[in-house]
Image (spheres, grey):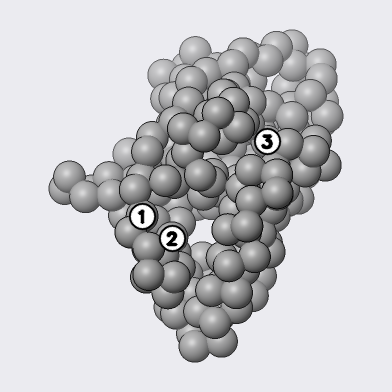
Amino acid sequence: VIGYTEYAPMNYTENGTLIGFDTEFAEAVCAKLNLKPEFVEIDWDTKELELAGKKIDCIWNGLTVTEERKANMDFTVSYLKNQQVVVVRTADAAKYSDAASLAGAVVVAEAGSAGAAAIAANLADSEFIEVQAQSDALLEVKTGKAAAAVIDLTMAKAMTGDGTDYSDLSIAPIDMLDEEYAIGFRVGSSAKAKVDEAIAALTADGTIAAIAEKYDLTDLLIM
């Protein structure tokens, strides 16, 4: 049972079907282990509780590895590099060009996310407001309710720029946290080692690289 939230390009619905890099990655690993994946949408802010309470068996959804989380879950091998980035309206790009320029400004991020931690560490002088999902953060910026959103680079690349619903938003040149994605299991889970073995095999045969290429993530792949 795989816990996820919807955001492109990791796990998202298109024409009624759940797709994305993490979705196909999970399906490939489960096929290798003769398992059938069951995807369950979760509240990201309570993901650790859902994992510990055995409502899900793992969190597989662009999960950032942190020292704090290592105390509450066992991580697989890391598979993608990521970064938290600041997204602003393109019309405001010149105005918001560094951390100091966002002092006193409303900045949004998903509750319990790496983006929220990045704001605390790098944009402490801003007015931080939590939202339910990363997609909500983008909408707050688009509608002018917030000056900036801090979200995953993977999502920012997929959701902003020409040809997207957020073509009027862009990534500001403000340095934030570098990070890695891995799959989170309950502490002591025997499944983690089996999944690591499957990941090694799928890395060796090129399966994961092919999925990464499909979702334009090749440059972020760690394996």
Q: Are the residues flagged by discs 2 and 3 in contact, CB closer than 8 Å?
A: no
Element class at badge 1: loop
Q: Tell me, for residue 114, which label it has, or none.
A: 3
Number of other residues with Cα within 10 Å of mark 2, as a class: few under 14, some 14 to 19, many 20 or more: many
Q: Give the distance between the C-alpha atoms of the residues marked 1 and 3, in whole angstroms.
A: 26 Å
Which residue: 45% across, 79% down? 207
| Sequence order check, earlier mark of 2 and 3 | 2
Percent of width and height locating residue 48: 62, 31
Which residue: 76% across, 50% down? 178
Compared to 48, does 27 lie above or below?
below
Residue type, label 2: Ala
Q: How many marks?
A: 3
Percent of width and height locating residue 30: 41, 65
Q: Tell me, for residue 26, which label it has, or none.
A: 2
Residue situated in front as seen by the camera: 62 or 3: 3
Residue situated in front as seen by the camera: 207 or 33: 33
| Sequence order check, earlier mark of 2 and 1 | 2
Which residue: 82% across, 42% down? 67
Element class at badge 2: helix
Residue under pointer 1: 37
Residue type, label 1: Pro
Residue type, label 3: Ala
Number of other residues with Cα within 10 Å of mark 3, as a class: few under 14, some 14 to 19, many 20 or more: many
Percent of width and height locating residue 198: 53, 74
Compared to 193, does 32 lie above or below?
below
Q: Give the distance between the C-alpha atoms of the residues marked 2 and 1, in whole angstroms.
A: 7 Å
Q: Are the residues flagged by discs 2 and 1 in contact, CB closer than 8 Å?
A: yes
| Sequence order check, earlier mark of 1 and 3 | 1
